[in-house]
Image (cartoon, helix red, strand yellow):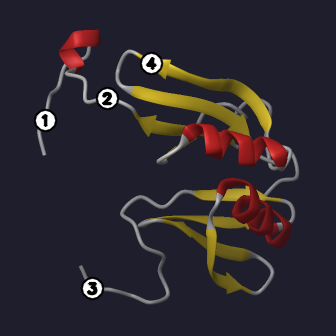
Amino acid sequence: MIRNRSMPPGILIPELGYADVRAAATWLCEAFGFYERLRIADHRVQLTLGDTSIVVTEGPQQPDPAHASTHAVMVHVDDVNAAFTRAKAHGARVVREPADYPYGERQCTLVDLGGHVWTFSQTIADIDPADWGGELRHRE
């Protein structure tokens, strides 16, 4: 794949709409630990976290209620408790407090200032998917 300095890193790059792009980018950096990579006027900001990216773009002030919870962005982190505490301190609305799950992850779910749902996940054990009812279909 050809590298383009104008594109953020990652294979899958979610674009999330916010009423105030710059305020949202600042909030996401402060609350979730993103870094601002590229600002494009007042309508678009690329943010990175590790080797992944999102694009903050102009969008509706309030999400369409019919589609408000049809997706979530999952972020793999080293410390879910720290991510949760930081986001909550910046006003993220709590959907699920940090909890351990039988598939080897500790997760929490929060809603950001634009109404987008975020799940933060920390690996706490290497669990065979068959142990909890999963079926591994493809090995990388």
C-alpha distance separating marks 2 and 3: 36 Å
Q: Is residue 84 above or below residue 125?
A: below
Q: Which secondary structure, mark 4? A: strand
- Nearest the eye: 97 or 55: 97
Nearest-to-viewer mark from 2 and 3: 2
Closer to the N terminus: mark 1 or mark 2? 2
Q: Which residue is mark 3?
A: 2
- How far is disc 1 from disc 2 in space, using C-alphas? 20 Å
Q: Which mark is residue 12?
A: none
Mark before the other along the chain sequence, 1 or 4 = 4
Type of amino acid at the residue the image marks with label 2 = Ala
Cα gap from disc 3 to disc 4, whole angstroms: 39 Å
Residue 116, quarter of the rendered image: top right
Q: Give the mark, 2 or 4, whose residue is nearer the N terminus.
A: 4
Q: Nearer the viewer, residue 111 or 128?
A: 128
> In the figure, is residue 72 to the left or right of 100?
right
- Which one is in front in this view, the residue at disc 3 or the one at disc 4? 4
90 relative to 54 in the view: left or right: right
Any part of residue 133 in sight: no
User: Which corner quadrant of the image does residue 69 belong to?
Assistant: top right
Residue at the (86%, 60%) spot, across then down: 19
- Please name the amino acid that badge 3 sits on: Ile
Position of residue 68 measured from the top left corner of the image (x, y, whole percent): 73, 34
Quick one: label 3 or label 4, which is nearer the N terminus?
Answer: 3
Task: Work out which quarter of the rendered image holds the N terminus and state it.
Answer: bottom left
Q: Which residue is mark 4?
A: 101
State the CA–CA distance, disc 1 to disc 3: 27 Å
Q: Is residue 121 above or below residue 87?
A: above
Q: Is residue 92 left or right of residue 57?
A: right
Give the mark toward the camera: 2 or 4: 2
Give the CA separation, mark 2 to mark 4. Answer: 10 Å
Mark 1 highlights which residue? 138
